[in-house]
């Protein structure tokens, strides 16, 4: 076999970044009166068709993304590498549709196994027993020596961004219930570390760039809430990207290092007025509104130099400012079709008003689950989108396309091509984020270390062997 | 004969335009309609439904 050269890393603009989102879906079977059924059994039925075509419950899809059963027997979907937030939103929404598409057959197989029930998949972060699961964000960084310092500068931003990008939730306490910005905030136990399950940090430092490690490393943010509304995803990823751009450019930023991050993230989450203060390392105190405004002002002051002005940047800055203003003025009406916590707040308040019940009423908890249900029929966020009550940014056609088609300007394009053609050929293959290989000793492994490269002669040759 | 609309009234150019419903009102109604529609299914065994959702592992 002809050997192609390993291409050098592509020269890319410093502002270009690879984004990815990993979503763990809540898996809930509702089958009153049925025999006991384990989550493993349900997940097995749900993934039956995936195992049929992929010979595994851990597969890469033709859209370049990864779909698998996570520890604890629930579906997880990791988007392919995206270099625009628009692609990321389309792929993220495509993931909701992909897991939902498994539900009908899963329910059918359950019925055949004697369990007549409904399978619900929630894109949320907490269950009824106090367990939490995540939506992990990945941002590709240019490698630098002081990652820890970099992370420390980002933490005050991550602690406070929940006032704009939180998913919102009813928090139940022995003293009564209240509405909070973020369901995830109470489940964070560290600022930065390499753990994920035992001690959950906001930034996970595990150094897995899935790319040339001399050039890149990954900023793995696990503090965020899963987002339903597309504008919330835009703001969550977009504002974080803009702050990272300032840090990467080594712009002088105000030192907002927090004294106690764990205390701060909880205090911010549970104060919908935005007036609760957090203690900074220097002993001073600021509100979450002030901290977010300081980051936003820093970003705004560098639009035109470090940050190139684009329509997307403008819309991120506009929504960010409106989100902060809404909390400051306590008038949520300017964001209640765009930011999840405000959309849910309106929904829950309206239903509470209708029922004339307390905030801890189980019917409101039921409504919260319905909001995050990814079903087009049972899911409320989807219904609200269809009614124009939640703003959308990408078209339904783009989402449908993203279910089967990878982003065209990243490595995902090569992976998607490989998976598609390998499946069509019927040959056994192995694939992960950086490797492509046909099973068999004669086949070479193609190592794809450059996440920006979407054309590669070695992949052409590998696929060329299919027709030989 | 003057052109008539569906209600049988002649058009009058100087008639006051009906005030457009504010967007806020429209979304309020749509939200209420949606809640009315799903209210029945949300009420059924809500507490048991919510409590039966437990997820282990992950991350």
Image (cartoon, coloured by chain):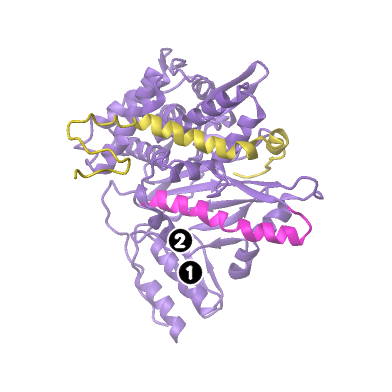
Q: Which mark is residue A64?
A: 2
Percent position (x, y) of residue A23?
53, 47
Image position of A300 (left or right of A183) = left
Q: Which mark is residue B16?
A: none
Residue at x 27% of width, y 56% of height:
A11
For the residues labelled 1 and 2, say whether their Cβ atoms are less than 8 Å apart: yes
Residue toward you, A430 or A54: A54
Residue toward you, A379 or A417: A379
**Chain represented in purple:** A
Magenta stretch, main secondary structure, is helix
Q: Residues within 10 Å of mark 1 (few under 14, many from 20)?
A: many
> Which type of secondary structure does the marked residue at label 2 adopt?
loop
Query: Which residue is the site of mark 1?
Result: A419
Q: Residue furthest top?
A: A284
Which chain is home to disc 1?
A
Q: Which residues are magenta?
A: A87-116
Image position of A148 (left or right of A255) = right
Q: Is residue A97 magenta?
A: yes
Image position of A49 (left or right of A282) = right
Percent position (x, y) of residue A401?
41, 61
Instruction: Choose top left, top right, bottom left or bottom right for residue A315.
Output: top left
Residue at x 32% of width, y 63% of height:
A8
Q: Residues within 10 Å of mark 2 (few under 14, many from 20)?
A: many
Residue A452 visible within the image: yes
Percent position (x, y) of residue A95?
50, 53
Residue A262 visible within the image: no
Whether marks 1 and 2 lie on the same chain: yes
Image position of A48 (left or right of A235) = right
Instruction: Choose top left, top right, bottom left or bottom right for residue A413.
Output: bottom left
Chain B's shade in the image? yellow
């Amino acid at each position: 076999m002809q050997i192609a050269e390993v291409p050098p890393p592509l020269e890319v603009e410093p502002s270009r970044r690879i984004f990815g989102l990993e979503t763990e879906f809540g898996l809930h079977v509702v089958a009153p009166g049925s025999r006991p059924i384990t989550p493993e059994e349900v997940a097995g039925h749900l993934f039956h068709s995936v195992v049929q075509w992929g010979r595994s419950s851990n597969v890469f899809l033709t859209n370049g993304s990864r779909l698998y059963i996570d520890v604890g027997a629930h579906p997880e979907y990791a988007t392919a590498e995206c270099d625009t937030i628009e692609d990321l939103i389309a792929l993220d929404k495509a993931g909701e549709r992909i897991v939902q598409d498994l539900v009908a057959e899963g329910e059918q197989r359950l019925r055949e196994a004697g369990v007549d029930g409904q399978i619900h998949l929630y894109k949320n972060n907490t269950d009824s027993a106090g367990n939490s699961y995540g939506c992990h964000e990945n941002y590709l960084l240019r490698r630098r020596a002081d990652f820890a310092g970099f992370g420390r500068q980002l933490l005050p931003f991550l602690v406070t961004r929940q006032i704009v990008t939180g998913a919102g939730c009813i928090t139940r306490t022995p003293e009564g219930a209240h509405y909070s910005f973020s369901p995830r905030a109470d489940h964070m136990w560290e600022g930065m570390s390499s753990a994920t399950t035992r001690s959950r940090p906001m930034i996970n430092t595990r150094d897995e760039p899935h790319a040339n490690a001399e050039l890149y490393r990954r900023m793995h943010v696990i503090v965020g809430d899963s987002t339903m509304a597309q504008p919330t995803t835009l703001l969550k990823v977009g504002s974080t990207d803009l702050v990272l751009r300032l840090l990467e450019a080594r712009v002088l930023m105000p030192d907002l290092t927090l004294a106690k991050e764990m205390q701060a993230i909880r205090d911010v989450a549970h104060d919908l007025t935005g007036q609760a203060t957090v203690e900074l390392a220097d002993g001073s105190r600021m509100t979450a509104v002030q901290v977010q405004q300081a980051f936003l002002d820093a970003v705004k002051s560098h639009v035109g130099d470090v940050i190139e002005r684009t329509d997307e940047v403008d819309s991120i800055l506009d929504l960010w400012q409106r989100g902060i203003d809404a909390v400051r003025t306590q008038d949520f009406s300017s964001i209640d079709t765009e930011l999840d916590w405000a959309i849910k707040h309106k929904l829950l308040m309206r239903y509470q008003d209708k029922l004339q019940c307390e905030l801890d009423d189980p019917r409101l908890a039921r409504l919260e689950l319905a909001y995050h249900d990814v079903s087009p029929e049972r899911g409320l966020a989807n219904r609200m989108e269809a009614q124009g009550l939640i703003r959308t940014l990408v078209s339904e056609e783009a989402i449908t396309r993203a279910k089967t088609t990878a982003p065209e300007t990243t490595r995902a394009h090569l992976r998607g091509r490989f998976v598609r053609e390998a499946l069509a050929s019927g040959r056994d293959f192995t694939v992960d984020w950086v490797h492509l290989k046909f099973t068999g000793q004669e086949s070479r492994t193609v190592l794809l270390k450059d996440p920006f490269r979407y054309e590669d002669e070695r992949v052409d040759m590998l696929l060329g062997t299919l027709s030989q | 004969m003057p052109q008539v609309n569906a209600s049988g009234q002649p058009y009058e150019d100087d008639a006051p335009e009906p005030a457009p419903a504010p967007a806020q009102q429209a979304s309020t109604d749509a939200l209420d309609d949606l809640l009315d529609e799903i209210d029945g299914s949300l009420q059924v065994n809500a507490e048991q439904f919510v409590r039966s959702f437990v997820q282990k592992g992950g991350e």
